[in-house]
Amino acid sequence: MATHRIRVTVNGMAREAEVEPRLLLVHFLRDVLRLTGTHIGCDTTHCGACTVLLDGKPIKSCTLFAVQADGRDVLTVEGLEQNGQLHPIQDGFWQEHGLQCGFCTPGMLMTGYALLQHNAAPTEEEIRWAISGNLCRCTGYVNIVKAVQYAAEKIQQGGA
Amino acid sequence: MMTLRTSPEVGGMGHAVKRKEDPRFIRGQGRYVDDIELPGMLYLDIVRSPYAHATIKNIDAAKALAIPGVLDVITGATLAKYNLHWMPTLMSDMQMVLPVEKVMYQAQEVAAVLATDRYSAADGVAAVEVTYEPLPVVVDPFKALEPGAPVLRTDKPGKTDNRIFHWEVGDKAATDRAFRDAAVTVKQDLYIPRIHVSSIETCGCVAQFDRVFGQLTVWMTTQAPHAIRTVFALVAGHVGLAEHKIRIISPDIGGGFGGKVPVYPGYVIAVAASVLTGKPVKWIEDRMENLQADSFARDYHITAELAAQRDGTLTALRIKTLADHGYTDAAANPSKFPAGLFHICTGSYDFRAAHVEVDGVYTNKPPGGIAYRCSFRVTEAVHTIERMVDIMAHELQMDPAEFRKKNFIAPEHFPYTSALGWEYDSGNYGAALELAMHKIGYAELRREQAEKRQRGELMGIGISSFTEIVGAGPSKHFDILGIKMFDSCEIRIHPTGKVIARFGTKSQGQGHETTYAQILAEELGIPVADIQVEEGDTDTAPYGLGTYASRSTPTAGAAAAIASRKIRDKARKIAAHLLEASEEDLEWEPGKFFVKGSPERSKTIQEITFAAYTNHPQGMEAGLEAVSYYDPPNLTFPFGSYICVVDIDTGTGEVKIRRFVAVDDCGNIINPMIVEGQIHGGLTMGLAPALFEEISYDEQGNIRQGSFMDYLLPTAMETPNWETDKTCTPSPHHPLGAKGIGESATVGAPAAIANAVVDALWHLGVRHIDIPITPEKVWQCLRASGVTDR
């Protein structure tokens, strides 16, 4: 099968690879770049475990080809921590017990991070709507909502 | 409530210690099975049947083998050469690994493609050509038992029908007599549908067979690694796999809920492929395979009857159940209990007589009978009794709360032996219900409901006062394939006072790395930060039966306490040596021994530990280690009362949960933050089957909910803001007074929701709605009663 050379900025670092045109972005991240924090939980774009940011917008990386990310900017869960400092959204999930098995967590973190980028003080309803494309089987969502609220407060206090 | 015996820095029982496992998960550094990559690893993908029942006429692999990267196509014939095409189930039935003759359900494994990468393996699957000849399909379990129904298990010599088992418990004569004498009886058919745990991580493994050392290592999504090792050794011993050469590693697990207890064919094929090639082989199922082929839960067709006196005193319970097991009995139950712990179905109530019958049936559906986050069929039991009690209360025109209180087992009657033979260890059901009623404002809600009814608005209040039965189990009753259901903890304290503790259980998100460390901190006074907890590697962990049925705290948690106390006993001897005092003169407080009456003469556990390696008494063995294999004397019986308030849209039939108050009692609590999190999650997995989730089949055996397009997990939008509270009735026999909490809420919640909906509609003549209570089902009720003509 013919391959394409793509150049993607992932977590601030330029990465290049030869990929099949059908390679999904999530497999590019996981199998080619070995960034395994981004997970796969379904085949139909419902669970959101594979959520990453593409040019700042949350997308489900199981429904995008790697070649579609050519020349663009991708942020994954591995890129949230900066200079050894957890991002407030990461700290929020820890402090508020917003995770149990941890499998949906990277997708939830990325969705929560993206929400706070454009809405610094979301209401509970806005948080629930934002994460409604991310399924969690463990937490019942209550503490995930609290985790995002925690992060919003920390960011407003100048935490990030 | 229990008092705190340790400081927050030590972090013993009762402290809301932040989880030790979280730093890796919030950085995306968890290590799940699909994250494992080994040099030269091959990928396995599976060809599945489009038919629910068909003879396999031919499998043509030529086109698949022509695809670059495809190395082999494994069929039942391949495995039959090694007698590995069938395997035993946990219930001692037989299940196909790969078929040689016919398929028995849609999505059954038919062949496996081995390739150098995921995409080539998937290409190979699409290119394998299988010729089928369809056979008559048996979907309805009632029709399966009719004379003349096609006999499905033609592999079983002499089998002439589709019945798997008939099982009954209780005093039939006394129960029938009580029904004859009863002033009031109610009878209801309830169907508790087939559902699926759908952990967000699907199942999979990496199998690595080393030909030089004859060593098999399997990283797999399993809740019970040791039991799996033994099963592998028993099933594949004849091809040379011996238990000391098998290592099962269960890495981080993305949710289990019972779905990662069974051995699925994919695991076995991957192991076989690795043994055949000498290369590591990865198999990861996708979501559709997971939903369509992995073990289901529930699928109980129940007819239940209650008898009562005119004053509302319950006298007898009678239940008949048809259990649809699919094509083989692959339930994950203790061996002696073909219907699990379903006979906890007398619930929280004092019955003098009860009788239960269950018939297991084969159909052309995937096998299973796992828990869906409950202890072996407890949810089926609780849903039945809580629905029936509500129906009886309404029938007698009694308030459902008052009716429950009248019939609860009284606190002074514990330990209580039920009519079906369980000895409940402890309980205070009235206190939990009172607290829930107070918290939700029950009386005011009833007034509001009456007012709204006048205006034609539909509002319902539902109660569920459930009793769980967890912590299997006492070895005299509980085993899996003969292996007794104890569990274990091994503690080693290093010279500098740091600890490694290993367990026979396996967390799938429950937070064992934190809560087990807290038990050790409580018992030894060593800070949680200094304690490393490990599970899931059979080469290092002591033997145990794994994590399911809320058994980790009741069994391995107890083992942690007992092993800690063994260490404390030895530490006392060393402290006496160091302090030149007699052992009897020493007193313990968490973290140190001191001489009675002179607390300044003391030795910390860290000082004692160092001495255990540097200055131990002559004649004593060095070191400070202990192991405990804990066999509980009884099960534990967590309980709770849940109250749900619903509003129903009279136009669409949509049920809106306005409030849900959950009062739980799990005895003494190790970590209140984690307990609350478990309850939140459990409630959401109770909401799910109550309103959304069901797996059903058409008459040809085609699954109707084979992906997340149709199988509806609750999102954050449907899930209410759970309100929780607790009472505390410690278990009298557990060393820590704890009971287990992971599943209570899943068990108790569906009945509260269903009861609320029926409560809203009772005056319209509605007596029962089977879960999931979809808008369509409610709308049909509203239309039938003339509430809506839309």
Image (tube, rainbow, N blue to C red):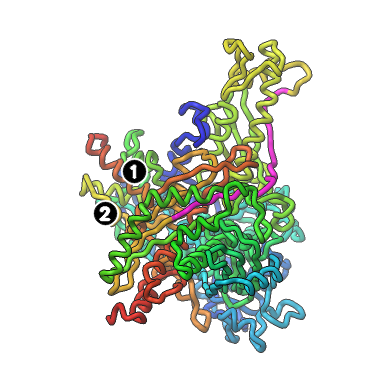
Q: Nearer the viewer, residue B666 or A32?
A: B666
Disc assigned to residue A79? 1
Q: Secondary structure at mark 2?
A: helix
Residue at screen point 55% across, 43% down: B729
The reply, left or right, for residue B774 in relation to residue B7 is left
Chain under disc 2:
A
Would residue B648 be found to the left or right of residue B409 on screen?
left
- In the rendered image, residue B641 lying in the magenta stretch gets the answer yes
**Res B47 seen here:** yes
**Percent x, y of residue B275:** 66, 58
- The location of residue B313, given as percent across then percent down, is 56, 62
Towards the viewer: B23 or A33: B23
Note whether B304 is above or below B543 in the view shown. below
Does residue B777 belong to the magenta stretch? no
Which residues, given as a range, are shown in magenta? Answer: B622-642
The x and y percentages for residue B131 are 57, 83
Q: Residue furthest right?
A: B619
